[in-house]
Image (spheres, rainbow, N blue to C red):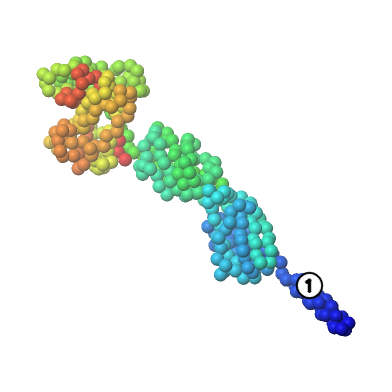
Amino acid sequence: MINTIKYSILLLFALVSFTACQNDDATSANIDAMVAEPGDLLNQAFPNNKVRVEGEGLTGLKKITLDNTINIAFNPNYNSDKSFIFTIPFDEKLGSRFGVQPITFTTASGSVTKNIEILQPVPTITKTTPAVATPGFPLEIEGTWFYNISSITLAGKAVSYTVKSSSSIIIGLPANAVSGSELAITTPGGTAKKTIDFATIILVSDFDGNGLRKDWTSYGDVESFNTSTSGGPTGNYTTLVWAGSIANGYNGSSGGGGASFLSASNTDATKAYIDIDVSANVVGAQFAIQLNTIDGVNYGYNFKITDVNWTTKTISIADFKDNYGFGSNTAANLNPSKINEIKVGIAQGDTPNPSAIKFDNIKIRYQ
């Protein structure tokens, strides 16, 4: 019996000793290198890069945690004792950031933490809205990786901007911007560049002595007409008053004709616009905007004032209609390069009496 007990004790010691030897031989998790593909970056990676981890004791990968907060998905089928592969995620909502940060790998043999540097990609510009910009107006830039912006320039000069998101920026275009200028957005990742084409803007009149039509006169049933009323949005403005007379059945004003405003290549009515600052003495006062007779047709556009405060009205040339704006045929096929006169009046048939319309800064724009 005593011999049996001694034998059992010796066997137990042998088993313990053997198990201890096995544990001594077990390889703990160890990371030798993290290599990003493509590019073979060592311990660095861009978002969406695949990273190959090399080392020992990597069997049974259980968890990958980036920056102590972000759990990274992985495919266990690509896991061996010597390596595994995962993809670098980037999600602002989860707290993703650039720079050096810890990454922890938990395997069947234990866990190990290393540092990896997440690099910021070069930004890209994919789209501008509108596609053809207008000097003095905002422009939305869409793209990728708009993080940590250090500067935005146009033709080498800084412009104001507001970052909406990592894929959208609103910039303020200077009024003197020149078509073909290069826009550059610079971040720590690099610089995105794009040539910006600008609309052609022709000032017809600002009633302060500038524009292609400086001398305006009125006609028809006009009660009074003043092209130098003070206190407008940018200086003097014009006031035209209709007080109920129907002797002629129409009224209006014009700076006269002459050379066409736009070049011969500006032939698409859907790309041509008239911008005009407008106001009136009363809501409901009805403006009548007319063009010179083109190909024997008289096109016009009529609209009512809904707010007596100054506002900029933008009218597409394609929205004009024949019969002085009261017809059924649009000017969608009109050749805007033939426009050489813009007339402004009051549509007498459907407007308060008296109506005093105010207008300023008439421009024709092609984009």
Q: How many labels does the image show?
A: 1
User: Residue beneath label 1, please?
Assistant: 20
Above or below — where is 156 with respect to 355? Answer: below
Can you see residue 185? yes
Q: Image quarter for residue 285?
A: top left
Q: Nearer the viewer, residue 357 or 285?
A: 285
- Residue 135: x %, y % from top left: 38, 35
Q: Image quarter for residue 89?
A: bottom right
Above or below — where is 359 with respect to 17? Answer: above
Left or right? Give the position of 116 relative to 352. right
The residue that appears at 33% across and 23% down in the rendered structure is 309
Above or below — where is 6 with respect to 360? Answer: below
Tag 1: amino acid? Ala
Residue projecting furthest to the left: 247
- Residue 214: x %, y % from top left: 27, 23
- Residue 153: x %, y % from top left: 48, 39
Q: Nearer the viewer, residue 33 or 299?
A: 33
The residue that appears at 35% across and 23% down in the rendered structure is 233
Q: Which of 306 and 254 is in front in this view?
A: 306
Left or right? Give the position of 198 relative to 353. right
Which type of secondary structure does the marked residue at label 1 adopt? helix
Can you see residue 344? no
The C terminus, quarter of image: top left
